[in-house]
Amino acid sequence: MSVKMISPRELHALKLGGHAVDLLDVRTSLEFREVHAEYACNVPLDALDPAKVMMSRNAPDDRPLYLICRSGGRSRKACEKFVTAGFPNVVNVEGGTLAWVEAGLPAVRGARVISLERQVRIAAGLLVLLGVALGWLVHPGFLGLSAFVGAGLIYAGATDRCPMGLLLAGMPWNRGDATAGAC
């Protein structure tokens, strides 16, 4: 499935040119609060209901909905969800919030947080280390934990779907205030 793309600079130029721009950030509310494009609103990918979002928009059907995340992966998945639900007029912001900030475009900054990607790496590393330690100190069967985590990482790399990331995104420390930045 081909997803339409736009660079952060092109999107910002549209906004400066007087075009109405609906920008939806699909990261967790905690990530959103850390830094987000100035006029973005937030609906996390795991809570995204394309029909509900489109019905809540006060915009003509022909006006695109722009989607952004940290680096472009989650927003691409969100675009695919919209297209599958029958809403093809969605556009992915290339490079996500990282590219937005790097381009020096207006951003709202809050407190620093540990990104979901870093949380996955920390959790995977801890589980592998725990499996090896328990396998060495308690019983070799615990090495299966490390193998399970390794298999999960291979799956995540091959499919671009990360069950551990989804699990961590649902944790209370990543949820924050559900109304912060909501559309």
Image: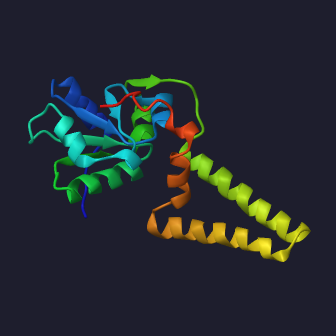
Residue 164 located left or right of residue 142 = left
- The quarter of the rendered structure image containing the C terminus is top left
Res 83 → quadrant: bottom left
Residue 72 seen in the current view: no
Q: Residue at x 44, y 43 (%)?
A: 70
The answer to whether 150 is drawn above or below residue 81 in the figure is below
Residue 144 located left or right of residue 52 = right
Residue 113 seen in the current view: yes
Nearest the viewer among 51 and 21 is 51
Nearest the viewer among 4 and 177 is 177
Res 22 → quadrant: top left
Q: Position of residue 44 (x, y in %)?
A: 40, 42
Residue 86 located left or right of residue 35 = left
Q: Residue at x 72, y 68 (%)?
A: 146
Q: Residue at x 25, y 48 (%)?
A: 50
Q: Residue at x 45, y 35 (%)?
A: 29
